[in-house]
Amino acid sequence: MRSRVLAISFGILFGTKFLGSFEPSRRIGKLSDQTWEAHSALAQNLQAYADPLQYPDFSGVGALLSVDGVLGTASLIAPNVAITAAHVLKNSQSDPEPIPADWKFILHPDYQNAPLERSLSVQKIVLHPSWGIRQNQKPPLGDGDTIGVDLALVFLSSKVIEVQPYALPFENGENLLGKIAYISGFGTLINGSDSNGDDQNTQRMAGQNQIDRVVPQILVSGLDTNESGGVFAFDFDSPRLDANTLSGENDPIDQLGLGTSSAQPLSMEVSTAVGDSGGPVFAWTNGNWKLHGVVSYGSYGQTGDSTYGDVTVLTRLETHLQWIEAQLPAWASSQFLGVGDWLRSGWFGLFRPFSNGWNFHSSLGWLYGSASNESSLWIWLDHLGWLWMSSEVFPYCFSGTETDWLYLDLASASPDPFRYFSYRNMQWKRNLVTN
């Protein structure tokens, strides 16, 4: 059974809007022997879950709520842009186009009790173009979820202050198959072995699962190659080792194809079944936590209620990088500090961008360049010329002038110009020319 609902399970909000009806069936599935307190602590990065090398920061995951009570999850990918699933906003061909003023993005661990400043109005909504195309070609719902184009961008009326937006994956980056992924969102609380749950939950939860299938691109008749999508998926394993839906022994589900899967659940394993709407999935790739997908739909076992055996299918963001990044501001994944236009990158540091492409960096001084996904970029520095930098290797960088690597000693930047080590000359130098 395939189900698409406006919500998320286990960490992913669920409202339910299906062919114009509304049913409040938000659900979240966890292992029966785990506590919800642990999943809530993970979602707030408290105590043992605060290590940024072991766990992603979930503070950029918020509730997307309409005036009609439709609930989904969205995640910051720029100080004023969040990403979610298209079906949260327009589930059917017959649904009207989403009106931005009808939606709020609530960025708080408990969306119902959030302070006013964490409830942000929406200025613009952009659905992935292929979502509407497939609804028109195969009305009323289309098949945009199964072919990986269930995606939308939500532009906020103001920038979120002091929350780090999520980095997107590299194009042609690491293979996700077999990687541990972390999921977050809001929804009804369900134990994996019991479909009865607490439907009054309004708190952000988080958990983990192992990625069992990856389909980089799904080509279908009626869409050009650059309009197509990709998906990945995981199943909800039981401690009894009897619910391994993606083991390869069962029939293939939708576009997922054949493969194998371990029957052993992880310690904080969760499900996002029953409707899954827009919640983020993070994996550690290329030296950082990256936002690799958003929850699209669930194909379920015998019950379809977020219990053991359910399968979650996600829209693969790497397939859509060109479409996403074309609509983002420069330095999208840098944190807005709320003072002037100063930004803080998790790896690049503190800097102030200007509209002409120049930036003033607290350690490097004046530099030229910008990027919508600054995990990897070229910048121009006076005296040093063009440098390639990456979140994986910084403060090491590659010099286009020396055609070799440099090491930037940022700690030496005050009060003097910073030092750098030239691997071509095997000696320390100072960047003596400053603007």
Image (cartoon, grey):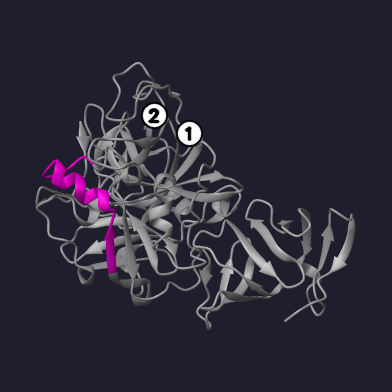
Does any portion of residue 199 appear in the rendered image? no
Disc 1 is placed on an element classified as loop
View extreme (bottom): residue:
340
Towards the viewer: 63 or 433: 433
Magenta stretch? Answer: 124-143
Residue 298 position within the rendered picture, expressed as x and y whole percent measured from the top left: 27, 37
Q: Secondary structure at mark 2?
A: loop
Which quarter of the image is occupied by the C terminus? bottom right
Q: Position of residue 137 (x, y in %)?
A: 15, 43
Q: Amino acid at mark 1?
A: Leu
Q: Residue at x 55, y 60 (%)?
A: 374
Q: Position of residue 428 (x, y in %)?
A: 88, 62
User: Spatial distance from mark 2 to mark 1, Cα to Cα?
Assistant: 8 Å
Q: Is 262 within the magenta?
A: no
| Residue drawn at 69 percent across, 61 percent down | 387
Residue with the mark numbered 2: 237
In the image: residue 271, left or right of residue 43? left
**Amino acid type of the residue tagged 2 in the rendering:** Asp
- Residue denoted by label 1: 266
> Residue shown at 30%/30% (left/top)?
255
Q: Residues within 10 Å of mark 1 (few under 14, many from 20)?
A: some
Q: Is residue 141 magenta?
A: yes
Q: Does residue 234 appear to the left or right of 395 in the view shown?
A: left
Give the vertical position of 29 relative to 429 (above or below). Answer: above
Q: Quadrant of residue 224?
A: top left
Q: Are marks 2 and 1 in contact (CB under 8 Å)?
A: yes
Is residue 371 visible to us here? yes
Q: Which quarter of the image is occupied by the N terminus?
A: top left
- Closest to the observer, 185 or 105: 105
Residue 259 x, y percent position in the rendering: 41, 22
